[in-house]
Image (cartoon, helix red, strand yellow):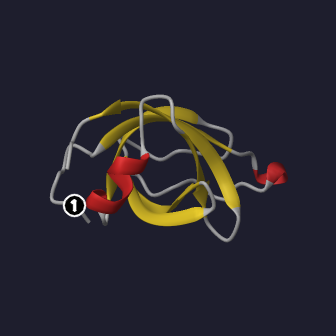
Amino acid sequence: MSDNREGDIIAHIVLHNTNDGGRSIPTPSHQFRCPLKIEEELFDCALLLQGSLRPGDEATVPIVFLSPKIVLPLLRVGSRFALWERGEIGVGTVEEILRTV
């Protein structure tokens, strides 16, 4: 992961309800790692959380990437993405880019 503990981006995310393909349990409370999908390509990331998120929750969170030099050039404010865990478990929109490469 990037050494940026504050995140590479800030994004608004919406986790799908369990019945809509989302997780069946809440996320861990401090950090949730999953692939982030941009235009059919998956990138490893971690959501930096202030507490657990349950299926159906919405939140604005910092996200840090394993390979920010590859991912950040693909993103702009307003870019949409999916969160992935054996399938799409949520969606998000980039609100702010905190780091440039």
Picture residue at 69% right of the left edge, 57% below the top: 88
Residue, far left = 3
- For the residue pair 20 and 4, the one nearer the viewer reads as 4
Residue 44 screen position, x and y as percent: 42, 66
Q: How many marks?
A: 1
- For the residue pair 99 and 47, the one nearer the viewer reads as 99
Residue 11 screen position, x and y as percent: 44, 35
Let me know if residue 24 appears in the view: no
Picture layout, residue 93 above or below residue 101 = above
Give the side of residue 24 with respect to residue 8, left or right. Answer: right
Give the side of residue 68 with respect to residue 60, left or right. Answer: left
Label 1 belongs to which residue? Answer: 2
Picture layout, residue 42 above or below residue 93 = below
Residue 46 screen position, x and y as percent: 38, 58
Picture residue at 63% right of the left edge, 61% below the top: 40
Residues packed near mark 1 inside 10 Å, few (<14), some (14 to 19) or many (20 plus)? some
Picture residue at 60% right of the left edge, 61% below the top: 84
- For the residue pair 53 and 33, the one nearer the viewer reads as 33
Residue, far front = 73
Q: Quadrant of the N terminus?
A: bottom left
Secondary-structure class at tag 1: loop
Give the side of residue 44 with respect to residue 25, left or right. Answer: left
- For the residue pair 64 and 22, the one nearer the viewer reads as 64
Let me know if residue 29 appears in the view: yes
Residue, far bottom = 86
Question: In the image, what residue type sits under mark 1?
Answer: Ser
The part of the image, by quadrant, that contains residue 62 is top left
Residue, far right = 19
Residue 71 screen position, x and y as percent: 38, 56
